[in-house]
Image (tube, rainbow, N blue to C red):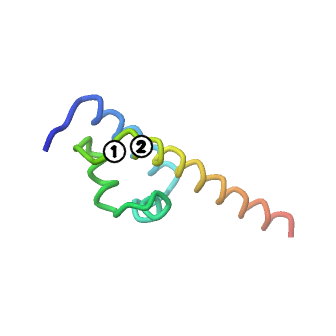
């Protein structure tokens, strides 16, 4: 399958962010609305449909998951 150095770099960077945040591919895929395999292909730099849209959804979903987790921790601390 087609792959470019730019796609590989982007995928590797976003995979590292996802892993650093301890977010599974499955959890991320549920937020984005795609299957786990699409996330895996994206992170490897392989060709996926609507790559630009998926890239933005990937980034936004990572932020939302992180915010949701932080809010959950904050609400526990307030109790």
Q: Which residue of the protein is positioned furthest toward the bottom in this rendering? A: 79
Q: Residue at x 86, y 70 (%)?
A: 79
Q: Which residue of the protein is positioned furthest toward the top in this rendering? A: 6
Closer to the camera, 74 or 59? 59
Question: Residue 21 appears at what percent x and percent y?
Answer: 53, 51
Q: Which residue of the protein is positioned furthest toward the left in this rendering? A: 1
Q: Please give left or right for residue 22 compared with residue 9 in the image.
A: right
The circle drawn on residue 59 is none
Q: Residue at x 46, y 57 (%)?
A: 32
- Residue 73: image quadrant is bottom right
Question: Residue 20 appears at what percent x and percent y?
Answer: 49, 48
Please report contact status of discs 1 and 2: CB closer than 8 Å, yes or no: yes
Determine crowd level at label 2: few under 14, some 14-19, many 20+ residues with C-alpha closer than 10 A.
Answer: few
Q: In the rendered view, would you say 78 is above or below 6?
A: below
Q: Please give left or right for residue 76 compared with residue 51 in the image.
A: right
Question: Residue 29 appears at what percent x and percent y?
Answer: 42, 60
Could you tell me how far apart the alpha carbons at marks 1 and 2 are, in whole angstroms? 5 Å
- Residue 72: image quadrant is bottom right
Q: Which residue of the protein is positioned furthest toward the right in this rendering? A: 79
Q: Residue at x 46, y 48 (%)?
A: 58
The residue at which mark 2 appears reads as 53
The residue at which mark 1 appears reads as 50
Q: Secondary structure at mark 1?
A: loop
Q: In the rendered view, would you say 24 is above or below 61?
A: below
Determine crowd level at label 1: few under 14, some 14-19, many 20+ residues with C-alpha closer than 10 A.
Answer: few
Query: For the image shown, how many numbered marks are present on the structure?
Result: 2
Q: Residue at x 23, y 44 (%)?
A: 47
Q: Secondary structure at mark 2?
A: helix
């Amino acid at each position: 399958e087609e792959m470019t150095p730019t796609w590989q770099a982007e995928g590797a960077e976003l995979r590292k962010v996802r892993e650093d945040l301890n977010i599974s591919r499955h959890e991320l895929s549920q937020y984005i609305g795609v299957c786990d395999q699409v996330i895996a292909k994206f992170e490897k730099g392989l060709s996926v449909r609507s790559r630009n849209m998926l890239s933005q959804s990937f980034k936004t979903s990572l932020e939302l998951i992180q915010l949701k987790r932080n809010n959950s921790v904050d609400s526990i601390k307030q109790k």
